[in-house]
Amino acid sequence: MFFGEFQHSIDSKGRLIVPSKFREGLGVTFVLTKGLDDCLFAYPLNEWKNFEEKLKSLPISSRDARAFVRYFFSGATECELDRQGRILLPANLREHARLEKDVVVIGVSTRVEIWSKELWDRYNSDTNMGYDAIAEKMAELGI
């Protein structure tokens, strides 16, 4: 399980140090893909396989389902940690998440998310205004 928030920087070669707290859970090789809300999602291989099975079960006849599957698979890449615990973030994924220098790496249960610090700060300030409303909706779902 992943949780916590860590501030890091991307070096001039596009590499990011994965927080040591997340390295064991992600494994030496894991899947990185485009995430929702303009961030990146990183999945350990076993969680990616679970997610992949759910995506594969979506009806191919549904335009929205096809688009959703394309979104995640077209951006997916296997990443490998180097000896310093870094990964190379592909240019297309850095562009998708608007990652330049300062990033925030957060744990979200079964996955890790990588955010531009600017977008993360904006997301938090926007969401903070609505946590009461979100909490009410979660209560309706039994949470």
Image (tube, rainbow, N blue to C red):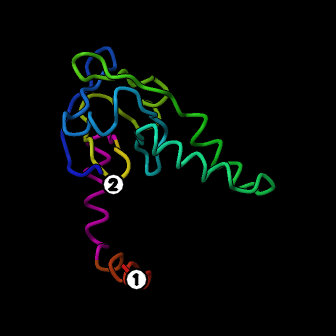
Q: Magenta segment: does it hold 134?
A: no
Q: Position of residue 82 (x, y in %)?
A: 30, 17
Would residue 44 be found to the left or right of residue 49 on screen?
Answer: left
- Residue ID at (24%, 23%): 85
- Secondary structure of the residue carrying tag 2 is strand
User: Please, what is the three-letter code of the amino acid marked with disc 2?
Assistant: Ser
* Residue lying at the far front of the rendered structure: 46
Q: Residue at x 49, y 40 (%)?
A: 34
Magenta range is 114-131
Instruction: State which quadrant residue 88 falls in.
Output: top left
Q: Residues within 10 Å of mark 1 (few under 14, many from 20)?
A: few
Judging depth in this view, the residue of 117 and 81 nearest the camera is 81
**Horizontal and vertical percent position of residue 126:** 31, 63
Identify the residue at horizontal 28%, vertical 49% (top origin): 2
Inter-mark Cα distance, 1 to 2 = 18 Å
Q: Residues within 10 Å of mark 2 (few under 14, many from 20)?
A: few
Q: Percent x, y for residue 131?
A: 29, 73
Q: Nearer the viewer, residue 129 or 114?
A: 114
Find residue 18 and name its label: none
Q: Which residue does the numbered mark 1 point to in the structure image?
A: 142
Compared with 6, 136 (above or below) is below
Q: Which residue is mark 2?
A: 109
At x 37%, y 51%, the residue is: 110
Specify the amino acid type for callout 1: Gly
